[in-house]
Amino acid sequence: MDLPVMPPVKPMLAKSVKKIPPGMQYEAKWDGFRAIVHRDGDEVVIGSRTGKPLTRYFPELAAHLLANLPVRCVVDGEIVIAHEGRLDFDKLTERIHPADSRVRLLAEQTPSSFIAFDLLALGDEALLDAPLSVRRAMLAAALADAVAPVHLAPATTDVAVAQEWFERYEGAGLDGIVAKPLDLPYRPDSRLMFKIKHERTADVVVAGYRFHKSGPIVGSLLLGLNDASGALQHVGVCAAFSMKVREELIEELEPLRMDPPDSHPWAAWAEESAHESARLPGAQSRWTGKKDLSWVALRPERVAEVAYDHMEGDRFRHTAQFRRWRPDREPADCTYAQLEEPVRYDLSEVLSAP
């Protein structure tokens, strides 16, 4: 492979803002795996956000990229999997599997798509210093004849249209809006774009914590919601505390500590079979490998209000943000019923937008 921009490349990133800024290019924020694709003739390399190769996990996508991308190019985009008309991040993570046979089976059962939204090189020309407006026009021309599952990301410069997308597209599993200055050059690993994400709050049961990597202080709180049967399901974590607060939480939560945790709702977390029938903390992640996922059990008696962006099935998609303790709330009242459900919106309509 001999391209003007060679792998690995870390993608340009976005910083969070509360409102959609005016005077920019706007795109939907896709909830998938960020990927930089290098193509040189018959050779394709799909690189992850960290620069690690993803090609072996998406064999069906590599073939479609060869069929749809220019012969020599470097394209920034997102790998997604759609299920029943919306993005499904869980099915995407299933692809990160060590067994090639499993990967190829899933490639047939839940094929992936690629959403292209930036162009870093074309032919012998590097485009990192070109403004976004030029790169976007060149990308649109390069993908004019592309067919599914390779798509050009819809984009607009109309802030009113962007606001409409922000309000409607969540129902298709999208994550918000990305705003990009039209004169912006491409700067790998720099937060020069802007992302606007949904934020909601929920009252949750704090039922445990994990230690911080630096020592015996709280790293994250484990959160639960009661399902229709009254069972407490693990829905995610909240973190991002100051070091001082992490130390204070150890003392504050000590009276609730259960040792041994035999009567805790999640006591079976260490048994692999238990994860098949309930949401429990500690399930091994293909991303974390052998990372220690053990946790300290707490009596599920404290309620906290947390902020979250959206749900992935029955859990928080991203780390929630602690807002405050709610001593006026009962743990039994912390149910899924309080969560706002976005209006369903078909992903095909998102992809057909201008």
Image (tube, grey):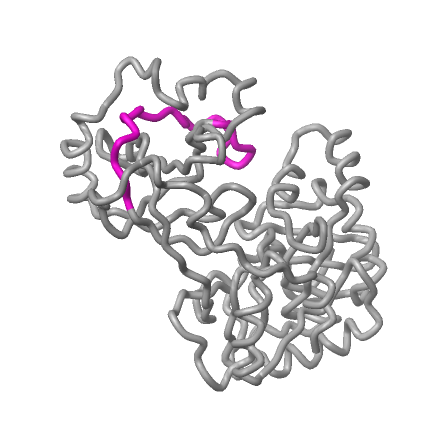
Depicted 25 relative to depicted 109: above or below: below
Queried whether the magenta region covers residue 122, the answer comes back as no
Q: Position of residue 214 (x, y in %)?
A: 26, 35
Q: Nearer the viewer, residue 197 or 73?
A: 197
Which residue is found at the position 45% from the left and 76% from the top? 20
Q: Is residue 286 above or below residue 112?
A: above
Residue 29 drawn above or below residue 333: below
297 horizontally vs 71: left or right: left
Tell me which segment is drawn in magenta. 283-304
- Residue 146 percent coordinates (x, y): 82, 67
Residue 133 position within the rendered picture, expressed as x and y whole percent measured from the top left: 60, 83
Q: Is residue 314 left or right of residue 85?
A: left
Residue 294 among magenta residues: yes
Q: Residue at x 66, y 55 (%)?
A: 86
Asked which quadrant contains residue 235, the reply is top left
**Residue, x 52% and y 65% (percent of image)?**
176
Looking at the image, how many numbered discs can be counted on the residues?
A: 0
Image x and y of residue 130, in percent = 59, 80
